[in-house]
Amino acid sequence: MDYNRVNPYKTSVSCLQATMYRPDEYKLNQLLTTVTPMALRVLFFALATVSPDGSVELRPVAMTRQFQTDASFIGRAVRELVKYKMLARKNRFEFWLSPAIASPITFQVPQR
């Protein structure tokens, strides 16, 4: 029996390579006990939107709709992450993500 005839999800020939960042388990436990829940949400937002050079753009006023809270709470969470050296300030709205926080995971995404 031919597998391609049975399988409705055929593998695509062309694939994009995607990279995500996730904290390893030890770091995640350390983060959960160190930072506030809002700072943790901002950190995971930063991990999801990090650029290839390791910088991330965090604009508290623009993030209020996604987080459904006031910009001052988001700004306080960003300052907390800078205090604990998880983020380093590049300029007013751009930050460097600490490489010790998360390790990259690379995977293939099929293009259609």
Image (spheres, rainbow, N blue to C red):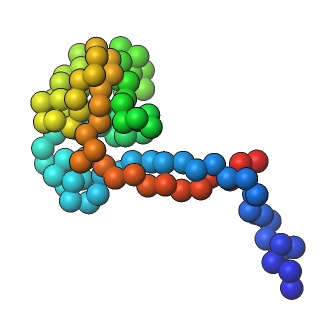
Hey, which residue is sitting farthest front in the picture? 53
Give me the residue at 21% from left, 54% from top: 27
| Residue 11 image point, x, y percent | 74, 62
| Residue 40 image point, x, y percent | 26, 39
In this view, 74 is above or below 103: above
- Which is nearer the eye, 41 or 108? 108
Q: Is residue 92 visible?
A: yes
| Residue 86 image point, x, y percent | 21, 37
Give me the residue at 33% from left, 22% from top: 94
| Residue 75 image point, x, y percent | 24, 20
Q: Is residue 64 visible?
A: no
In this view, 36 is above or below 27: above
In this view, 43 is above or below 77: below
Q: Is residue 13 left or right of residue 107?
A: right
Instruction: Locate residue 79: give its quadrant.
Output: top left
Instruction: Locate residue 84: give its quadrant.
Output: top left
Give me the residue at 16% from left, 52% from top: 30
Give me the residue at 19% from left, 47% from top: 31
Instruction: Locate residue 55: give its quadrant.
Output: top left
Q: How many marks?
A: 0
The N terminus is located in which quarter?
bottom right
